[in-house]
Image (cartoon, rainbow, N blue to C red):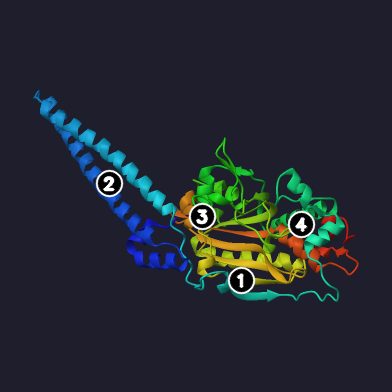
Amino acid sequence: MLDIKILREQPDLVRAGIRRKREDPSLVDKALELDLQRRQLLQKGETLKSRKNTVSAQVAAMKAKKEDATAVIAEMRGVADEIKMLDEELRTAEEALRSVMLQMPNLPDPSVPDGTGPEDNKPIAHWGEPPVIDFPPKPHWDLVKSLGLIDFDRGTKVTGAGFPVYVGKGARLERALISFFLDEAMHAGYTELLPPLMVNADSATGTGQLPDKEGQMYVVQSDGFFLVPTAEVPVTNFYRDEILPEERLPVRLCAYTPCFRREAGSYGKDVRGLNRVHQFNKVELVNLVHPTASAEALESMRAYAESLLRKLGLHYRVLLMCAADLGFTQTKKYDLEVWSVGQQRWLEVSSISNFESFQARRLNIRYRPAAGGKPEMVHTLNGSALALPRIVAALLEHYQTPEGKVVIPSALHAFTGFEVIG
């Protein structure tokens, strides 16, 4: 959620930022109107409360002098009734303002390029080269079928399309990658959490899934819970409504969870196999940092995620996302994409995002300055390190052999217990 002070002091800046995201800036005017109404009600209420205090003192003085205070008492009761009515109007205005503010997206960082869509995302780094394969490479959906690693058909029977079942060495490879990513995060100084797989509406609102992405989440209707679309939601909410001492910053957390996404409207060749599924595994990083440190933290998280891809030996590129391709909550984001040999296309495996104070303001996560003063909002960041489905797809395609086998990269040998599949 944006700081209301920015809307009051720089409304044109906010409108311009919202337009860069290809969103409707009319919410700015609605918010300013409601904010003015709220402040007027607040001022009027304070004036009446001051009047009530004055009248109360007057009643006490008249009673002490044995004077008739009937008329003054009637006035005091009338003022009290008016105060109660104004307090209700103020609550209504505050709720309306919050509702509008929750619908307003975060503003793009000035370093984010303009654009109209994914085609305007800016490649800023590459690593490695596509493997030299002197035979027709197979896409991963053919490899997992021939090697018996993933059963899509039986997953569809058990649940529905987009819920694959990992089998044998496929399941062990998945488990190995999760352990590898968690161990690497621990060595990098992250504290591991094992969070719930369901969250309440307050948590989903805090990180920005509500009211923006409710159509993408699975809902437990009877309890009002949401299956986690990413560990970002429960992990970032871990410190909701808390004040941390400045000395605790930065807070660096990681978590593995299955992730559940409806992905409504997804179809076609780009969603085949593991390219887009409804349940998948991911290790997520979350940072809570001092406001002056979030830009540096973003670059550090990006470098860390890149290091995992290098250890796996996967050819990848880094994209700086344009303003129109940023999510609702993000001010700046990098996407990491690996090269799919079997599909001859790039596959996104990680997004590293800075939200600055946008999520923290919704979550009410603050820090108390060591030098004293009022608590201030932390900055939050998160990143995939990494999402497994397309990593598995890229690994299988990258390391396939002419005989239809798959060689396991050395970084995973201690976790898989085998070096070759097939």
Q: Position of residue 351 (x, y in %)?
A: 62, 63
Alpha carbon of mark 1 to alpha carbon of mark 2: how far?
A: 47 Å
Image location (x, y in percent) of residue 142: 81, 61
Q: Is residue 322 above or below residue 149?
A: below
Quarter where residue 32 is shown? bottom left
Q: Residue at x 24, y 37 (%)?
A: 83
Q: Earlier in the sequence, mark 1 or mark 2?
A: 2
Q: Which mark is residue 246?
A: 3
Q: Nearer the viewer, residue 368 or 238?
A: 238
Type of the residue with mark 3: Glu
Circle 3 packing at 10 Å, graded few (<14), some (14-19), many (20+), is some
Q: Quadrant of the C terminus?
A: bottom right
Numbered-mark total: 4
Type of the residue with mark 4: Leu
> On screen, 346 above or below 155?
below
354 lies left or right of 402: left
Circle 1 is placed at which residue position?
319
Measure the C-alpha gap from mark 4 to mark 3: 34 Å
Per the image, the residue denoted by label 4 is 177
Residue 56 seen in render:
no
